[in-house]
Amino acid sequence: MSDKIDQASDVSELMRCNAIAAHYVNAKLSKDKTPLPSGECRWCSAVAVNDAVFCCEECARDWQGHNATKQKAQRIAGR
């Protein structure tokens, strides 16, 4: 029984690491200025695993959308 639990835990951690890596790739492609990892989620202030920037993929997407809107507003304002 513990073997299946260990496998599920490994798969879950791999999915989380892949989501974080995908966020970094998307951030670099869109020239998004992603904050440095601090172990605390930059969006909701929850604990982020493995000194990540965000605690989950949803927070990363929300922050990225907010940042894109902010950058667009700055471009419109001519800054």
Image: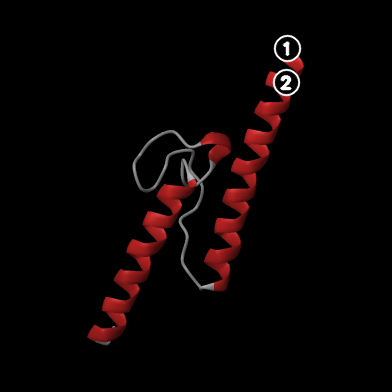
Mark pair 2, 1: CA separation: 6 Å
* Residue displayed at 46% across by 56% down: 35
Classify mark 1: helix, strand or loop. Answer: loop
* Residue displayed at 56% across by 65% down: 26
**Is disc 1 surrounded by few (<14), some (14 to 19) or many (20+) residues within 10 Å?**
few
Classify mark 2: helix, strand or loop. Answer: helix
The answer to the question of whether label 2 and label 1 lie on touching residues, with beta carbons closer than 8 A, is yes
Question: Mark 2 highlights which residue?
Answer: 4
Say whether residue 73 is left or right of residue 27. left
On the image, the x and y values in percent for residue 3 come to 76, 17
Q: What quarter of the picture does the C terminus occupy?
A: bottom left
Q: What is the number of callouts on the image?
A: 2
On the image, the x and y values in percent for residue 55 come to 46, 40
Question: Mark 1 highlights which residue?
Answer: 1
Amino acid type at image mark 2: Lys
* Residue displayed at 58% across by 50% down: 19
Label placed on residue 28: none
Outermost residue toward the left in this view: 77
**Is disc 2 surrounded by few (<14), some (14 to 19) or many (20+) residues within 10 Å?**
few
